[in-house]
Image (tube, rainbow, N blue to C red):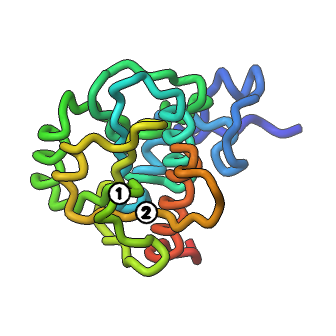
Amino acid sequence: MGPWPSESHYDPDLLREGDSRNVVDKYRYWSMEAIVADLDTHRHSFHVAIENWQHDLNIGSIVRTANAFLANTVHIVGRRRWNRRGAMVTDRYQHVLHHPTIEDLLAYAREHQLTIVAVDNVETSQPIESTPLPDNCIILFGQEGPGLSPEAIAAADQVIEITQFGSTRSLNASAAAAIVMHAWIREHADLAR
């Protein structure tokens, strides 16, 4: 065996002790800071926001999916605390911001020229299957059960829903988030990257 790599993005402790993290091979033995810095060079232009009024367990799964699709930032609206177990430590590689209210999220969106796309099956929703998603946007999800608050629906520039064909009224929040993020990827991502 030859000498260990010496480039600055490698973590000497991981090289010595092994790297059991769930990262793609490219990032094996890299420091967490180096991984985040590299991800920052090619994050997508969509953001994800989740209302957190009831301490929803889906938030961690949504953060993990946002990392998988390389969302720019995840925004938690409402309660600051959320169950990180479902994120499977991907929140370490994902930018996560907190906004106390929907008004604060709306101010962030305006400041950064981001369209707010609410996802809920309400009367004013347009089907995602036939509605283009904006390139620079915040995709806003509600809580499991009650969905988005009336304030969130009112703040949105666009409201979409996932067309369903069965007997249940709604999808699991983390499943819906994965579907919508993937729809954005299909429409806007450079798959050659």
The residue that mark 2 highlights is 161
Q: Which mark is residue 80?
A: none
Kindly give the residue lying farthest to the bottom in the view shown: 130
Q: Is residue 115 in sight in this rendering?
A: yes
Front residue of 108/124: it is: 124
Q: Is residue 34 in sight in this rendering?
A: no
Q: Picture coordinates of residue 99 (x, y %)?
A: 22, 32
- Which quadrant would the N terminus be assigned to in this image? top right
- Which quadrant would the C terminus be assigned to in this image? bottom right
Give the residue drawn at x 56%, y 50%.
Answer: 171
Q: Residues within 10 Å of mark 2 (few under 14, many from 20)?
A: many
Q: Helix, strand or loop at disc 1? A: loop
Kindly give the residue lying farthest to the right in the view shown: 1
Q: Picture coordinates of residue 91 (x, y %)?
A: 49, 33
The residue that mark 1 highlights is 122
Give the residue drawn at x 31%, y 22%.
Answer: 79
> Is 124 on the left-hand or right-hand side of 67?
left
> Is 93 on the left-hand or right-hand side of 109?
right
Type of amino acid under label 2: Glu
Give the residue drawn at x 15%, y 61%.
Answer: 113
